């Protein structure tokens, strides 16, 4: 059984929050008691700062896992299209 709080799980949960805010670049700093996250807009200006202590990371990861159970394939495809469009990229070798 994978660790409940792997870097992948934590970064996925934090990434979902950053996607909702619409940041274009990020900086994540690990601190003794959690994470300090900064999000920047397309001009490189600070858009958001978030500090997550251990209890708030626990809650965030649990909430992200519950939401992941509810995401359908169609919604995932839409998110991929939006991400690729936002970053001026296209998926090669597949049709969406």
Image (cartoon, rainbow, N blue to C red):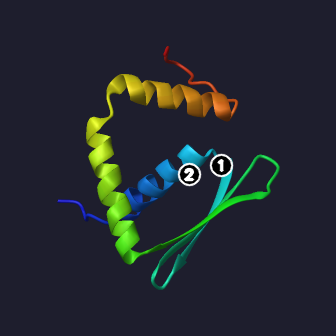
Instruction: Tell me residue 85's x, y (percent).
Output: 64, 27
Q: Quadrant of residue 20?
A: top right
**Extreme residue in the top direction:** 95
Instruction: Tell me residue 47's x, y (percent).
Output: 71, 56
Instruction: Tell me residue 2's x, y (percent).
Output: 23, 60
Is 95 left, or right, of 61 in this rendering? Answer: right
Q: Is residue 49 above or below residue 76?
A: below
Q: Element under label 1?
A: loop
**Which of the two residues, 18 or 93, is positioned nearer the viewer here?**
18
So how many labels did they put on this image? 2
Q: Is residue 28 above or below residue 11?
A: below
Q: Element under label 2?
A: helix
| Residue beneath disc 1 | 23
Is 39 left, or right, of 63 in this rendering? Answer: right
Residue at image position (34%, 59%) is 61
Residue at image position (32%, 66%) is 5
Mark 1 residue crowding within 10 angstroms, few (<14) / some (14–19) / many (20+): many
Q: Is residue 18 above or below residue 35?
A: above
Q: Is residue 43 above or below residue 80?
A: below
**Extreme residue in the right direction:** 43
| Precedes in sequence: disc 2 or disc 1 | 2
**Extreme residue in the bottom direction:** 32
Asked whether disc 2 touches disc 1, contact meaning CB atoms under 8 Å apart, the reply is: yes
Instruction: Tell me residue 91's x, y (percent).
Output: 56, 24
Q: CA distance from mark 2 to mark 1?
A: 6 Å
Is 78 left, or right, of 64 in this rendering? Answer: right
| Residue beneath disc 2 | 18
**Extreme residue in the left direction:** 1
């Amino acid at each position: 059984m994978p660790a409940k709080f792997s870097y992948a799980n934590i970064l996925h949960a934090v990434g979902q929050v950053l996607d909702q805010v619409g940041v274009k670049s990020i900086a994540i700093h690990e601190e003794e008691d959690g994470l300090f996250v900064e999000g920047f807009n397309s001009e490189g200006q600070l858009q958001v700062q978030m500090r997550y202590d251990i209890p708030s990371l626990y809650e965030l990861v649990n909430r992200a896992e519950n939401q992941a159970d509810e995401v359908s394939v169609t919604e995932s495809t839409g998110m991929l299209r939006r991400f690729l469009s936002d970053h001026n990229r296209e998926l090669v070798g597949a049709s969406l």
